[in-house]
Amino acid sequence: MILARIYVCLKPNVLDPQGKAVTNSLRQLGYASVAETRVSKYIEISFDTSNREQAKLETERICRDLLANPNTEHYSFTLEDKEGGKA
Amino acid sequence: MKVSVITFPGSNCDHDALEVFASRGHDSRLVWHKGRDLQNPDLVVLPGGFSYGDYLRCGALARFSPIVNEVLAFAQKGGLVLGICNGFQILTECGLLPGTLLMNSGLDFICRHQRVRVETSATAFTEGIPAGTVLDIPIAHKDGNYFCDDTVYNELRDANRIVFRYCDAAGITTLEANPNGSRDNIAGICDASGRILGMMPHPERSATDAVVSQDGKRIFDALESHFGLGG
């Protein structure tokens, strides 16, 4: 099995009100050096294959087709082998 | 006028929209999202609600419902499509309208009456409503913060495709009158032909005598006049 760890983040020019609210809370907690917080999405997909190239291509397509909105978000991912499954 | 209102799992304004059209004497029906037959409508309504629980992004999963392919084909043939609130979000996700509805800048779900200014009467939905008219139409959303890049914004502005802007009672589009951080107070936009409209305010919630504002009727009047019906 191959595990894709996918990060979908707001582009830098897109305001992140959630991140702003978290920054404010962190400062209230005393973390004075926190300059900025960005809240993103983390998604895991397990592929029932041992073919890394195939998993990579599919993850790319999945990100483009559904997981990230190209207007406002960009994505990145890593792949790793995972125990279990048929492969 | 024949109207098909699409029901997605999580739609909750579909019956309200249906009721408005039915009460005005139009041949109206709900169409389940898994269907593949729009039933030959003149107008398709994508109603408000929380399709697929707003999972991933608002409207992102609804785009893959089977009926949406039919809506795309209908739009391509020149059919009229009205997306209200979640329907607007779905229209942007499926590419019928540009831009994205982001989370409100204040993070709150906002449910209240809102003034919007009609910016153009050159759409099927605002025909006969003079530009500058101020309407009181309720909003109810958490993700209504319209975002687009400069290229899209300039195109929308220059082609008169910004249909509604949030404003105050005097019709001024102030920062204070902007409930959600939307770019340039945008509350609704249309496609280049003026036949596909996405709007965050809910005209179906201000179109019967039982509620405080009846300004939403103006939009349904406009649609009827577009089809040569009514006064």
Image (cartoon, grey):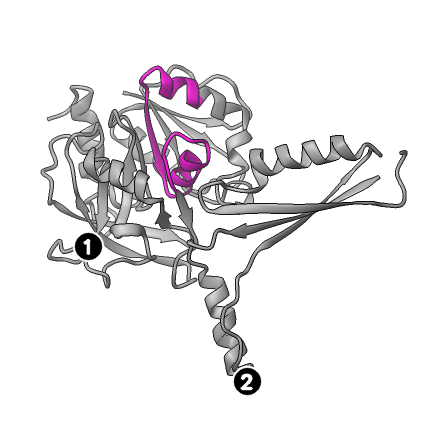
Is A31 placed left or right of B215 in the picture?
Answer: right
The magenta region covers B71-99
| Count of marks overlaid on the render | 2
Secondary element type, mark 2: loop
| Residue behind mark 1 | B167
Q: Amino acid at mark 2?
A: Gly
Which of the 4 quarters of the picture holds residue B81?
top left
Q: Is residue B158 visible?
A: yes
Q: Is residue B94 magenta?
A: yes
x and y percent of residue A68 in the render?
55, 42
Image coords of residue A19 (percent x, y): 50, 64
Q: Chain of mark 1?
A: B
Crowding at dot 2, Cα within 10 Å, few <14 / some 14-19 / many 20+, comes out as few
In the picture of the structure, the residue carrying the numbered disc 2 is A30
Closest to the observer, B181 or A11? A11
Residue A74 in percent (x, y) is at 54, 46
Picture residue at 11% right of the left edge, 40% below the top: B131
Which of the 4 image quadrants contains residue B152? top left
Q: Residue at x 35, y 44 (%)?
A: B149
Mark 1 Cα shell of 10 Å, populated few (<14), some (14-19), many (≥20): many
Tell me the quadrant of the picture where the C terminus of chain A can be found: top right
Q: Are marks 2 and 1 on the same chain?
A: no
Residue B55 makes an appearance in the image:
no
Instruction: Please tell me the numbered disc located at residue A40.
Output: none
Dividing the image into 4 quarters, which one contains the N terminus of chain A? top right
Q: Is residue B45 magenta?
A: no
Q: Is residue B4 left or right of residue B35?
A: left
Residue shown at 58%/46% (left/top)?
A75
